[in-house]
Image (spheres, rainbow, N blue to C red):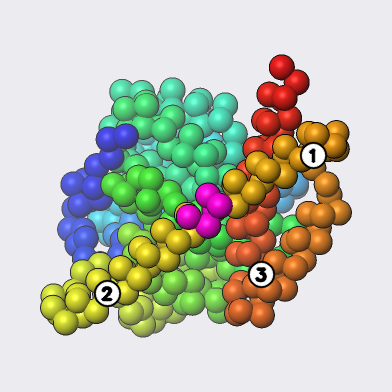
Amino acid sequence: MKIDSISSWLPNFNSSEPLVIAGPCSAESIEQMLTTAHAFKNIPAVKIFRSGIWKPRTRPNNFEGLGEIALPWLAEVKKQTGLLTTTEVATAKHVELCLKHGVDILWIGARTTANPFSVQEIADALKGVDIPVMIKNPINADLQLWIGAIERINNAGINKIIAIHRGFSVADKLEFRNDPLWRIPMELKVKFPELPLICDPSHITGDRELIQKVCQKAMDLNMDGLIIETHPTPDTAWSDAAQQVTPDRLKTILSQLSLKTEYCSDADFGAQLNVLRNQIDRLDNELLHTLKLRKDVVEKIAKAKIEQKITALQRNRFDQLMKERMDAGKSLGLDELFIKEIFDAIHDQSVKLQTDLFERSKK
């Protein structure tokens, strides 16, 4: 993919600082929009004003945004403050109306990202248009679905793309509204290092009291920016009231961020880091060697099963193995979910290997 850097198209953006996008969850009135936007004059880090014109909702009869009548309000925000504007689009008609009213940046929401037909419809509407597009991760934890949406927009000729990490819907609600599953956006960054990646702590947390924590985590992971829902009076907001902050609170959150750099000029530190990285390299090589040895044993097990005519998958054995491995990992201070993911992947590969051997034995 060919992706342009943010600094190549965003005026006055300093790449050494996070890109900050802020504004209310929903456009409620022109007064609300302008009050919020003017408050950002005291927060120079805010470069882009966001607000939802259309609000996708799971069930009918909830507030779904004011629609087209609110688009001129975004134009007025830009006229009075100079801030670039952005809003969510979910259909080709939304794209058409945003372009008509001069919206500067579009974003594709999590529900839309999950539907390749909808993303393609938007991509087709964008052909021949030069406009930045931000793409949120899909609701479900599917990296390939996220990548596919990004590729569809890129294939339409859009090179100004930003990925937004907003967390994933999970059955078990823990601390946050949506599970961050940080490994997924980090894997996206590894695959496409040129792709700007920003974090949406508002939708991850669902709770304004937790936003600072997630913002800092995003900065610790070297993400490129933040999109934070901000409202003059959050408790009266028409949508997602609990996760919006006031402009004053936004200013505090940003001022308290500890920003890190990717490189350090301290030679002693660099040498120390290289020693530790060499240790990691050796341990990784040992892991790979161990996995090869394990594969060899799995093949021997498969051949023994074939001779005795028993199935490749034995569920009771797997359940017992997982319990033992997770208990062992926990005793070593390792995260249980991490251990489960590793051994799920190892087991899937083992079953595939045995199944392939079973199929070949029939020929």
Q: Kindly report the distance in space between the C-alpha atoms of the residues bearing marks 2 and 1.
A: 45 Å
Q: Which mark is residue 136?
A: none
Magenta part of the chain: 289-293
Residue identifier under label 3: 336
The first of marks 2 and 3 along the sequence is 2
Residue type marked 2? Val
Residue 351 covered by magenta stretch: no
* Residue 46 can be seen, yes or no: no
Q: Residue at x 37, y 65 (%)?
A: 282
Q: Is residue 266 positioned above or below 112 on the image? A: below
Labelled pair 1, 3 in contact (Cβ < 8 Å): no
Q: Residue at x 70, y 68 (%)?
A: 326
Along the viewing direction, whichever of 59 and 236 lies nearer the viewer: 59
Residue type marked 1? Lys
Q: Kindly report the distance in space between the C-alpha atoms of the residues bearing marks 2 and 3.
A: 29 Å
The first of marks 2 and 1 along the sequence is 2
Q: Which mark is residue 275?
A: 2
Query: Which element is circle 1 on?
Result: helix
For residue 123, side relative to residue 294 (left or right): left
Residue type marked 3? Glu
Query: Which element is circle 2 on?
Result: helix
Question: Residue 303: image x %, image y %?
Answer: 72, 37
**Image quadrant where residue 363 sits:** top right
Residue identifier under label 1: 305
Question: Residue 337: image x %, image y %?
Answer: 65, 65
